[in-house]
Amino acid sequence: MFNKTDSADKRFILNDKQEGITGGLRVLTDSHTGVQYLVVRENTGVAVTPLLNADGKPLVAGAEDRT
């Protein structure tokens, strides 16, 4: 799912990441639905949540962000 070399098999695409000493932030896009997720890692904890638009609905990436 995450480490396949064939891009057609990738379910989640890494759009952006910011790393620090004890953690970091990543934005992933689900290549099947286009929904974008924020992944926060801090020390030993991890949180995943969908990004929301101004209307409170899941943020959906355009086709160019899904490849």
Image: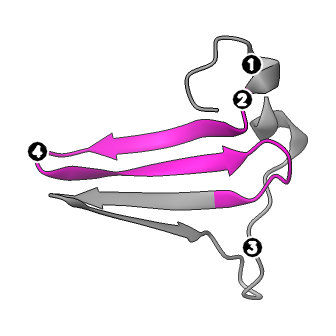
**Residue marked by disc 2:** 10
Lower position in the chain sequence, tag 4 or tag 3: 4
Q: Where does residue 63 sit, x and y in percent of width and height? A: 89, 40
Q: Where does residue 45 sit, x and y in percent of width and height? A: 25, 64
**Residue marked by disc 3:** 58
Q: CA distance from mark 4 to mark 2?
A: 28 Å
Q: Where does residue 34 sit, x and y in percent of width and height? A: 81, 52
Lower position in the chain sequence, tag 1 or tag 3: 1
**Residue marked by disc 4:** 21
Residue drawn 12% across and 51% down?
Answer: 22
> What residue span does the magenta drawing correspond to?
10-36
Q: CA distance from mark 2 to mark 3?
A: 20 Å
Q: Residues within 10 Å of mark 2 (few under 14, many from 20)?
A: some
Q: Residues within 10 Å of mark 4 (few under 14, many from 20)?
A: few
Q: Secondary structure at mark 1?
A: helix
Task: Indicate the amino acid at tag 3.
Answer: Pro
Reply yes or no: does residue 4 show up in magenta.
Answer: no
Our reading of the magenta stretch's main secondary structure is strand
Q: Secondary structure at mark 3?
A: loop
Q: Is residue 67 above or below residue 14?
A: above
Residue drawn 78% across and 52% down?
Answer: 61
Q: Secondary structure at mark 4?
A: loop
Q: CA distance from mark 4 to mark 3?
A: 30 Å
Task: Indicate the amino acid at tag 4.
Answer: Ile
Farthest residue, direction front: 1
* Of marks 1 and 3, the one in the foreground: 1
Reply yes or no: does residue 31 show up in magenta.
Answer: yes
Q: Residues within 10 Å of mark 1 (few under 14, many from 20)?
A: few
